[in-house]
Every structure is written in C-alpha cells, then in structure tokens.
Image (cartoon, rainbow, N blue to C red):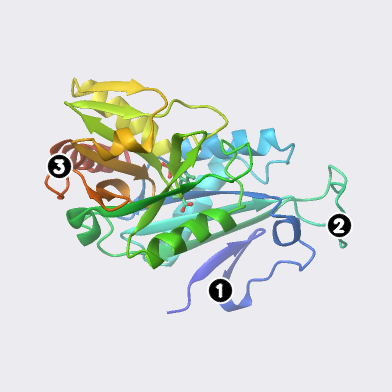
C-alpha cells in the first residue's frame, strides 16, 4: 500500500514526496528526529516527544518548523490517512538548504525541512520479541559527545545493530570509559535484588521519553531505583535487565555477551514494567 507522507506542508503519496539533494539533513546529518508510537490509533507520550524536539532544535540553533499544536495535527492526520492502529510516526526536521553545499549554516531565515511518515506495525504491543527477550552484545561507544540531542547521526548505532546481528544477537549496549551509556536505540537498565540501576541523565545519553515515564511508574509502584554509572560486568551478574524506547516500550534483556541473566527468560520486573507502561500510556494517549 502506498503511504501518505508529509513534506513541508503537503500530504503526498510516498513516491511523490521530495526533498532537495542540497538538504543539510542529507549532506551533513544536520537534522533532528522523533519517533512516537501509536497504540489503538492514538499517540503515546506525544507531549514528551514534542518538548524534546523543541529542546533538540534549540540546542542546534535550528528554527522550529511549526507549533506544537500543528505538529499534533500532522501526526493525527497521518495516523488517520494511513489507518494506523499500532505503529510509529517518524518525524524529521533538518536545517533545510539554500541550494548549495557549505559547512557554514545558511542564513537564519532559511526554512527548515519538516518530514513525517508512518510505519504500520501490527502487534507492536503484544510483541513476540518481548516475550522472548533480547540478546545483546557490548561494543565501544564511539558516538559524538552530544547524545542528548536527538540527531540523525545514526551510522554507528546502525553498525552496532549489524555487529549484534552478526553475533546472532538482537542489539548492542555501548560502553564508554568502562561504563554502559545506553543501547543503540534505547536506554539500558539492570535489576539486582529488586533494585533497578540505570545511568543518570547527562550529555552522554538520550533523555528517553519512555525512560522518564517508566521510572515514574516504577517509583509509583514502590520499586527501588538507583541512577548511577554501571559496568557491563555488573549487568552480566544481574538478576534481569531491560531497555526502554518508543519503538519497543520495555524490552526484557535475557543475555549479555553470551551470559544468560537469571534463568535466561524475561524477568518479573521488566515484564511488570512493560505491562504497567502499556496500560498507563494507552490511557493517556492522544
Ligand atoms: N530511539 N537512546 C537512544 C540512542 C535512542 O535512539 C532512543 C530512541 C532512546 C529511547 O528514547 P525514547 O524512549 O524517547 O524513544 C534512547 C528511537 C526509538 C529510534 O531511533 O528509532
């Protein structure tokens, strides 16, 4: 089925949508993005994604392409036009182009490019992968130093994912100065003796919208949380582990670098948090 996508003010069939070859997103990865999940035809954590987008734009001195209300309207319209019940909305804002390649930013009045499209993912919530749990490998984190800004510089995360696939695994966790930063496209946690351990927010990791919601829900459920640096060896000795992201919610991790966690099946805390998160976020979806 041909999707309807959004490009700079127009809703078009995907094969008619065009962006300039001089677009700075294409030439310089000078672009930021958001991924918002859709359940029951509604947007999950939209407000959080919209606020983070604004922050990413501000950090890069990139103009905002439209208001939050307009963004919500575009998201909703795409979900409706494409009949998405479960899936994702991808949004990208780039600094646009003044029609040539130049390291210097174009003048501030150059209009940014705004592109959105949907991805239909039936069974996203009731995912077989989440029932099985993910196997991960650890690799060195050689990304740039402002991972709190959600830029489209995703080559290394993509290579990490391929390294994991080659090793017969599902994903990779990234290690910097001996400590786990995060997953290729998710935040990372382990659980030992009932305590959830995760890296604190800083420029080193993306400030996950799912992370914020899951930690709030864990706290409300009286779970113990410790935000501190941790090593991959600590995680390997954990009772269980998991990741969070808008595209996979709470994903249990059952193996790290070939070491099975607990009995090698999704742990009770990860399973419970997935349930609570899905239940609560469905209620608040817009
Ligand atoms: N990735 N860390 C990184 C490096 C990420 O790319 C993501 C999200 C997260 C989780 O953030 P959130 O909970 O706001 O989705 C953490 C998205 C899903 C992606 O690139 O497809």
In the structure shown, which secondary structural element does the residue marked by tag 2 occupy? Answer: loop
Q: Residue at x 42, y 64 (%)?
A: 119
- Residue 20 in the image: state x and y as whole percent: 76, 67
How crowded pointer 2 is (Cα within 10 Å; few <14, some 14-19, many 20+) is rated as: some
In the structure shown, which secondary structural element does the residue marked by tag 3 occupy? Answer: loop
Residue tagged 3: 262
- Residue 34 in the image: state x and y as whole percent: 52, 48
Q: Tell whether 54 sits left or right of 211.
A: right
Comparing marks 3 and 2, which lies closer to the viewer?
3
> What is the tally of numbered marks visible in this picture?
3
Q: Quadrant of residue 145?
A: top right
Location of residue 68 with respect to 7 vertically, above or below = above
The answer to whether the beta carbon of the residue marked 3 is less than 8 Å from any atom of ligand 1 is no
The CA span between labels 3 and 2 is: 55 Å
Residue tagged 1: 14
The CA span between labels 2 and 1 is: 24 Å
Q: Residue at x 42, y 79 (%)?
A: 1
Mark sitting earlier along the chain (3/2): 2
Comparing marks 3 and 1, which lies closer to the viewer?
3
- Residue 167 in the image: state x and y as whole percent: 36, 63
Residue 47 visible somewhere in the drawing: no
Q: Residue at x 45, y 61 (%)?
A: 163
Location of residue 136 with respect to 7 vertically, above or below = above
Residue 277 visible somewhere in the drawing: yes
Residue tagged 2: 98
């Amino acid at each position: 089925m041909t999707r309807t996508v959004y490009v700079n003010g127009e809703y078009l069939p995907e094969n008619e949508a065009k962006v300039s070859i001089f677009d700075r997103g294409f030439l310089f990865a000078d672009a930021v993005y958001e991924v918002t999940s859709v359940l029951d035809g509604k947007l999950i954590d939209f407000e959080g994604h919209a606020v983070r987008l604004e922050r990413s734009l501000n950090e890069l001195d990139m103009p905002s392409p439209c208001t939050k209300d307009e963004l919500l309207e575009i998201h909703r319209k795409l979900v409706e036009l494409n009949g998405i019940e479960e899936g994702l909305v991808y949004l990208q804002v780039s600094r646009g182009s003044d029609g040539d390649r130049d390291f210097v930013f174009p003048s501030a009045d150059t209009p940014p490019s705004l592109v959105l499209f949907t991805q239909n993912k039936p069974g996203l919530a009731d995912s077989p992968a989440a029932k099985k749990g993910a196997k991960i490998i650890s690799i060195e984190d050689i990304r740039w130093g402002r991972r709190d800004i959600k830029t489209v510089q995703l080559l290394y995360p993509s290579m990490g994912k391929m390294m994991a696939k080659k090793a017969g695994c599902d994903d990779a966790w990234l290690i910097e100065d001996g400590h786990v930063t995060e997953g290729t496209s998710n935040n990372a946690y382990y659980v030992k003796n009932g305590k959830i351990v995760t890296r604190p927010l800083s420029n080193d990791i993306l400030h996950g919208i799912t992370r914020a919601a899951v930690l709030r829900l864990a706290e409300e459920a009286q779970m113990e949380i410790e935000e501190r640096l941790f090593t991959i060896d600590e995680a390997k000795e954990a009772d269980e582990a998991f990741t969070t992201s808008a595209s996979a919610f709470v994903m249990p991790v059952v193996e790290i670098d070939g070491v099975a966690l607990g009995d090698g099946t999704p742990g009770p805390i990860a399973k419970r948090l997935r349930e609570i998160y899905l239940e609560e976020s469905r209620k608040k979806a817009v």
